[in-house]
Amino acid sequence: MQQDPTNEQQQLLTLMQKAFDKAKHGNMDASKMVTWLQKELQNEYTFVKEKAL
């Protein structure tokens, strides 16, 4: 099941905005932000993959 690239980009931008907002409030530095983004993207990928099955 292929996702619409525009929708996928929008989801990624939303996720990046969430990470930026968290960092802005002093909850994470750049390294923590990257780690958080990786974890969120991995969770999202797993969710989409399971949903497709």
Image (cartoon, rainbow, N blue to C red):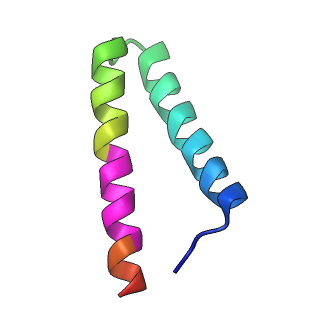
Q: Is residue 44 above or below residue 40?
A: below
Please check the rendered image and state whether residue 46 is part of the magenta-colored stretch, yes or no. yes
Outermost residue to the bottom = 53
Task: Using residue 31 as the reference point, say whether residue 15 is left or right of it.
Answer: right
Total numbered badges shown on the rendered structure: 0
Residue 9 or residue 33, whichever sits in front: 9
Task: Using residue 15 as the reference point, say whether residue 7 is left or right of it.
Answer: right
Outermost residue to the front = 2
What residue sits 27% from the left and 29% below the top?
Answer: 35
Q: Is residue 22 above or below residue 43?
A: above
Q: Is residue 28 above or below residue 51?
A: above
Please check the rendered image and state whether residue 47 is part of the magenta-colored stretch, yes or no. yes
| Prevailing secondary structure class for the magenta stretch in the rendered image | helix
Task: Using residue 45 as the reference point, say whether residue 5 is left or right of it.
Answer: right
The span picked out in magenta is 40-48
Image quarter (top left, top right, bottom left or bottom right) of the C terminus? bottom left
What residue sits 31% from the left and 52% below the top?
Answer: 42
Residue 11's x, y, as percent?
58, 51
Residue 44's x, y, as percent?
39, 58
What residue sits 31% from the left and 65% below the top?
Answer: 46
Which corner quadrant of the image does residue 49 belong to? Answer: bottom left
Residue 44 or residue 20, whichever sits in front: 44
Q: Is residue 13 above or below residue 5?
A: above
Residue 2's x, y, as percent?
56, 74
Residue 26 or residue 39, whichever sits in front: 39
Residue 48's x, y, as percent?
41, 71
Which corner quadrant of the image does residue 5 belong to? Answer: bottom right
Residue 6 or residue 21, whichever sits in front: 6
Outermost residue to the right = 6
